[in-house]
Image (cartoon, helix red, strand yellow):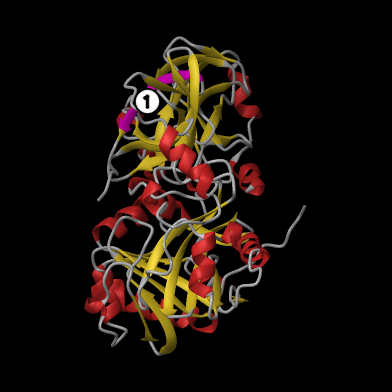
Amino acid sequence: MSETLQRTPLYDLHVELGARLVPFAGWEMPVQYSGIIEEHLAVRRAAGLFDVSHMGEVRVRGRDAAAFLDRLMTNEMSTIKPGSARYTVMCQPDGGCVDDLIIYRFSENEFFICLNASNAAKDIQWLRDHVGTAKVEIIDECKLWAQLALQGPFAEKILGLVTALPLASIKRFGFLVGEVAGASGCVVSRTGYTGSAGFEIYLPAASGIPVARALLTAGKAHGLIPVGLGARDSLRLEANYPLYGHEISERISPIQAGLGWTVKFNKEQFIGREALRRQAEGGPSSSVILFSLNDRRIARQGATVYAGETPVGEVLSGTFSPTMNKPIGTALVAAGYVNSEQLTVDIRGTRLPLSISVIPFVK
Amino acid sequence: MSQVPATLRYTKDHEWVRQESDGTVTIGITDHAQAALGDVTFIDLPKAGKSFQSGEVFGTVESVKAASDLYCPIAGEVIESNPTLNDSPDLVNREPYGGAWMIRIKPKNPAEVSQLLDAAAYSATL
């Protein structure tokens, strides 16, 4: 199974910047440039630029677009105002997650969806399979767009150097369409996956490298550096944002993952509603917890969580938190143990106590 | 390119070995190894008095990305492990051949050192 890896429109720039490239979700992606911890701290203290062009995009438009999406998504789609976006999960009938998504409403009958790279083809097929008699068009735009994330306390100042768009007017999860560094038709949204302030920018694929260069040049004096997927993972984990295939998956529902706030039972019908309702009312059989370790060893995906000598769960994600200066992670733990102060995790034969955190490690 | 000092001996597993004048040997990981690991966050080293065969796992080095085993290049008994690395594991990324040495051992068979790769042979594996 030697599948050819896809390259983003920014590939040549990654090579030029000395990135270490690794396979990720079928793509050849930069895992780091200068070092994961340095890149992580740049985002927390100044700013970082990520190539996230591997993410997929699909446009859904037509008379029934809002109603169609309301039927597939756990969150409410018809109440999104044009010019705003919303985070949602798309579920299977059994409550497992097909994917988690950000959905942008361009106008009354036109939506634009950002998909996880690993799920993009599956998601688009899922949307098409559920159209039925709805009057909607589903347009695969994965190849058309490059995507950059500019994140960190100086992101707005830096972006303001290369665009005339009124950035201050963009609220959290709001967006504007316009010109960035000479590239027209860019979608600029105040969203991100780091827990720091910042923007995500969707731009025509051919503009990927020139816009990234313009941002890196403009941002240099403010501490902007390119950031790879390694720091993207440690940043999102500190902020307790789920990653598909880890905290949410076909077997872990949004209720289990602590994403109940995205599930709107006031909608009369959506795929997964009954299963999710049972979980929400009766309590799920297992739930995702966030933890830290008072050690230097990292509890990685698959490590077993114990209550005494009884295995009660497994680690879903684990990394070193530069902000906390200690290992952090998430685990799926059986009901009844999610508030336990007695849990341990096995790391290569050593049992270390888990400190459960009920709030993210960064705001 | 990574540094490969000419005065040291090497293994294909990216450990380096330095013969000391008192007959002990000092062991660490190469510049190439630290670069491949990325930011090192934890190093698990054996206590003095433990003995290892050549090729046996003597410890673990953990980076943000992964945990990797450390292989003992030659048979011997641990005299000392580097106490600095407990608090400053990231020293491995800065001084792989200097301050971040890992263990000092008393070789079982001192001739084993000369059977390891020299700098040119190790460089050829990179």
Lateral position of residue A320 relative to residue A229, left or right = left
Residue A213 among those drawn in magenta: no
Q: Which residue is mark 1?
A: B82
Q: Is residue A247 in view from this perspective?
A: no
- Residue A10 to residue B116: above or below: below
Chain ID, mark 1: B
Residue at figure coordinates x 42%, y 30% from the top left: B43
Residue at the image point whose x is 30% and y is 30% from the top: B87
Image coords of residue A354 (percent x, y) = 36, 26
Magenta range = A349-356
Residue that extends furthest to the right in the rendered view of this protein: A1
For this rendering, which residue is in front, B79 or A30?
A30
Relative to residue A258, is residue A75 depicted above or below?
A: below
Q: Nearer the viewer, residue A20 or A328?
A: A328
Q: Nearer the viewer, residue A42 or A202?
A: A202
Q: Indicate the position of residue A292 as horizontal and vertical percent values.
A: 34, 33
Q: Is residue A360 visible?
A: yes
The answer to if A354 sits in the magenta stretch is yes
**Location of residue A281 in the rendering, given as x and y in whole percent from the top left corner:** 42, 37
Q: Name the residue at 51% across, 56% down.
A: A269
